[in-house]
Image (cartoon, rainbow, N blue to C red):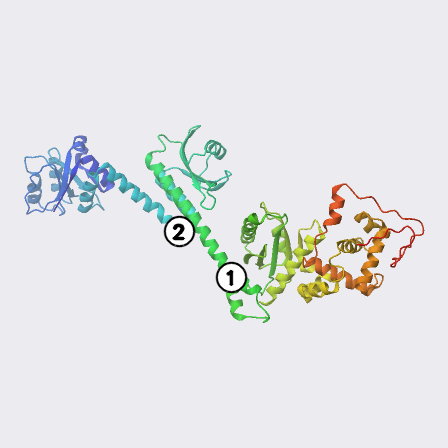
Amino acid sequence: MSSTTAECTLGTVLGELGSAASLIGNSGAWLDRKVSGAVIWLAADPLPVDTQQLVVCPEALIDVATVRALLDGAESRAVVVRAPTDQTIAEYILDRSRTHAIVVLEQGGTPADAISATERAAQSVDESVSRRLASLQRTLSRALADRSTIESLASRLKKLCNATIVLLDRNGDVLHATGPVPLSLLFGEISKTHSESQIIDIDGWHGVATRLEDFDEPDEHLGWLVATSRRQPFPDPYVISAVHMAATLVEVDRRMTTISRAQERAIRATVLEQILALRPIRDDPELAGRLAGLGVTFTGAARVVVLRPVRSTRKARLAETLEQLAAATAATLAAASVSHLITVRDNTVTVLAQADTPEIAALLSRQSGPVKFQCGIGRRITVVADAADSYHDAQLAVQSLRRSGSQKTTMSYEDFDLATALFSDVGLDQMAARAEVYFAGIRDREALIDGLRAYFDHGQNIIAAAAELDIHHNSLRYRLSKIEEALGVHLKDAGDISSVYLALTALELSGKLDARTARVTRRNSGHARAADIAASGTPTDYPGTEAGPGVVMDDS
């Protein structure tokens, strides 16, 4: 059997064989000998006519007759034999090495290796490059199957390039490194340009850096993959190709991870949506089992948390803001090993977390990110259906924070005042529906609603409430009398005060009253209207329909 290929040299063949073979006598003259192909030779076969063919003897040389048949010819040949075990034969082969180029297969080398090495050595430059790149791609791609893809990929690239591998994010922070490097020096160099790839040569450090593209944000990049060393020459074309391939695999891994997380989150969100919609059965073993399979149980503390961005956001940007808030929250809980489900619904981020109020509040208070938020934490969950109640508690807490204008950013079910707790237990929707009927006579009269709000905000202190509204206190008394008349109540009766306050609070928490634009606008504009003027003799109690002397009548 023979293999015919393009010409190469014996030295190239030996280079392909590596440690599997050695040249007898170490004569450098034989390294430039031309080799046109390889042929398998058996003792009974004649030698090939072409003396440039590499003669490969697969049989062990155990008798002198076979050795003489192979090496006694007058023409010089290149032959490959197994290492002889007989001393006489070994000495004879050494003697004939002056005439023939004799290659001995070391332990582990086979005749097939010699044939393959000859074929590889004779390949064209393009074929050789293609083969090396294919081998490089296979080696690096295997990292995708490892549990820690980035670490495995960096380790493989380090061995291939014999260099230190560093993965940086867009801010220059190290995501992974296989060894020490002058980080500030390298980052200062590579951040000077927006080039996709660049060669590094600074203060004795040489290398190549390639930008990692972000598929989700085409105008941004993830960071850089850098291979660096202090040796010269570095990098060579092989190293540059390896770094570019590895960078592509990092981008692919990032994309696969993003898609995987999105799918996992969609599954978790579906389960959470089903839990929140669960009515009226208090328990569902199947749903509880699915929830337990995702790592959340009710044997320990578990609560629903609602997060709402503090700043108003344009509708086009709201979805992006909520996604950023959801991602940051998921990362915070995952870093603390808190089992959770998360979804975006009703312009809020809703979370079911396996933790109690103090731990949740502490974790979210330390959460970093561009989105500032208010946080409502619902009641503790003991069965699956409690999740819906806990969710409504959390919604109510967020609405209370927005209504109060407080500097607080977190409110839990345990923080509710009596009225809010009542709404939570009875149901805000039912309370708001009753309140709408109760307030039907004054809901469309903004001045009366503003007066009532200020009256309760200042603990029923008419003077302070009037000052906030920038009106005379008798005008506020007049408005309150109109409210008493419309609702059929008396604002000095404890029962009536409670009813009016609960109805007002229910409408505010449910969002069924307009914002307090009138008095806020007046207070902030810096242009207050002329104050009402009171004459002496003005009644101190609520006036009736007839005004006393000097009382300004406000028909609103």
Which one is nearer the viewer's eye here, 121 or 197? 197
Query: Residue drawn 76% across and 59% down?
Result: 442
SS category of the residue bearing label 1: helix
**The disc label shown at residue 23, or none:** none
Amino acid under disc 2: Asp
Q: Looking at the image, tell me whether mark 2 or mark 1 is earlier in sequence order.
A: 2
Whether residue 436 is visible to the viewer of this picture, yes or no, is yes
Pick whichever, 266 or 451, lies toward us.
451
Residue shown at 5% from the left, 37% from the top? 73
The residue type indicated by label 1 comes to Thr
- Residue 5, horizontal then vertical, whole percent: 16, 40
Q: Which residue is disc 2 drawn over?
A: 146
Residue 228, visible in the rendered structure: no
Given contact means CB atoms under 8 Å apart, are the residues at marks 2 and 1 in contact?
A: no
Labelled disc at residue 270: 1
Image vertical order of residue 192 relative to residue 330, above or below: above
Dot 2 crowding, Cα within 10 Å, few <14, some 14–19, many 20+: few
Which residue is at the far top? 203
Q: Residues within 10 Å of mark 1 (few under 14, many from 20)?
A: some
The quarter in which the C terminus is drawn is bottom right
Residue 409 in the figure: left or right of residue 210: right
